[in-house]
């Protein structure tokens, strides 16, 4: 079972990283991270804070965007080109295929965010006064590691780059040691962004199991916007909007995943809120994300199992 799911996931990842649209979004995300240096230069002794805050916002924004795009098009492309039929004719269950597509999209976004997080750590290190020599050593060592992986896996170079990319932010994290507080914020923001991607991708996979790419993207984006506004919807004033509308908004806020918890205030990410340690907060957010993702994937798998492809 796991071998079949992994095969579908890796194939989905390989197709996604070759898409021009994804490469364009990746370039835009990296440009946005670089632009944070320009904004930081205009601030007054808050360069590290600006880079960390803009970097965290970039991780969330582009991570969700990629999840919506891939979640809306990946499954439909297989159905449109009818490549799904020879796959499902083999000993693989439909829910395994759907779960593999989901895992491949999450893996793609994780690789994308790993590169972005590494770039943010490098910028923080440079602004915090880290020596250029250590940065050069990091580049050389990581380049040698990546080259060794690619050379040893000549027929699977796309997959060989995954461990190298995932190792990059870990190395850059230690390089950004002088910016201790801000790098901790970026770690928490990256983890929460991945939790958010888990839910958004599950929502897109659910809609993709029975809908078109346009409607899937529209429905997923709508759920995301409502989820980001869940706290506001739950506390709409009854005197201005009436009890029925307020009750409807509050009910909607309880049903839709609350995406606002994945973008908490800066003091919470820094662990400055009394009684709310950042580690515990991130753990609870991760548990909630996994719960929503499992529930949505179960419903999506059931719908996909019942779907008639004729």
Image (cartoon, rainbow, N blue to C red):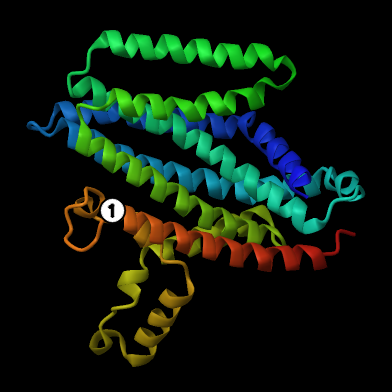
Picture coordinates of residue 85 (x, y %)? 88, 48
Quadrant hosting residue 182: top left
Picture coordinates of residue 106 (x, y %)? 57, 45
Residue situated in front as seen by the camera: 176 or 33: 176
Picture coordinates of residue 93 (x, y %)? 83, 56
Q: Is residue 297 above or below residue 173?
A: below
Residue situated in front as seen by the camera: 204 or 266: 266
Of all residues shown, which one is farthest toward the bottom? 243
- In this orientation, does residue 243 appear? yes
* Residue at the image point whose x is 57% and y is 38% from the top: 108
Residue highlighted by disc 1? 278
Drawn side of residue 21 relative to residue 211, left or right: left
Residue situated in front as seen by the camera: 215 or 196: 196
Q: Quadrant of the C terminus?
A: bottom right
Residue situated in front as seen by the camera: 191 or 239: 191
Picture coordinates of residue 216 (x, y %)? 62, 58
- In this orientation, does residue 30 appear? no
* Residue at the image point whose x is 52% and y is 59% from the top: 290
Q: Is residue 289 above or below residue 172?
A: below
* Residue at the image point whose x is 60% and y is 29% from the top: 20
């Amino acid at each position: 079972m796991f071998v079949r799911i992994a095969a579908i996931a890796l194939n989905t990842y390989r197709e996604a990283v070759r898409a021009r649209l994804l490469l364009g979004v990746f370039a835009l995300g990296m440009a946005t991270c670089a632009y944070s240096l320009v904004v930081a230069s205009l601030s007054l002794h808050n360069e590290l804070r600006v880079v960390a805050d803009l970097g965290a916002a970039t991780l969330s924004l582009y991570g969700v965007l990629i999840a919506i795009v891939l979640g809306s098009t990946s499954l439909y492309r297989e159905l449109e080109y009818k490549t799904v039929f020879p796959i499902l004719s083999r000993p693989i269950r439909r829910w395994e295929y759907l779960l593999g597509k989901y895992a491949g999209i999450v893996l793609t976004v994780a690789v994308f965010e790993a590169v972005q997080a590494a770039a943010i750590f490098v910028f923080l290190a440079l602004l915090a006064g880290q020596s250029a020599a250590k940065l050069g050593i990091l580049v050389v060592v990581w380049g040698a590691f990546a080259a060794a992986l690619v050379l040893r896996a000549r027929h699977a170079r796309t997959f060989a780059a995954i461990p190298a990319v995932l190792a990059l932010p870990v190395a850059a994290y230690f390089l950004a040691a002088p910016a201790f507080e801000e790098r901790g914020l970026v770690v928490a923001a990256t983890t929460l962004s991945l939790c958010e991607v888990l839910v958004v991708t599950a929502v897109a996979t659910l809609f993709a199991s029975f809908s078109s790419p346009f409607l899937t993207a529209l429905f997923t984006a709508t759920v995301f916007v409502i989820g980001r506004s869940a706290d506001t919807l739950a506390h709409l004033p009854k005197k201005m909007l009436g009890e029925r509308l307020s009750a409807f908004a509050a009910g909607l806020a309880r049903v839709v995943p609350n995406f606002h918890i994945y973008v908490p205030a800066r003091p919470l990410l820094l662990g400055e809120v009394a009684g709310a340690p950042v580690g515990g907060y991130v753990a609870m957010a991760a548990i909630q994300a996994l719960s929503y993702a499992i529930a949505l994937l179960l419903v999506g798998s059931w719908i996909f199992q019942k779907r008639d492809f004729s």
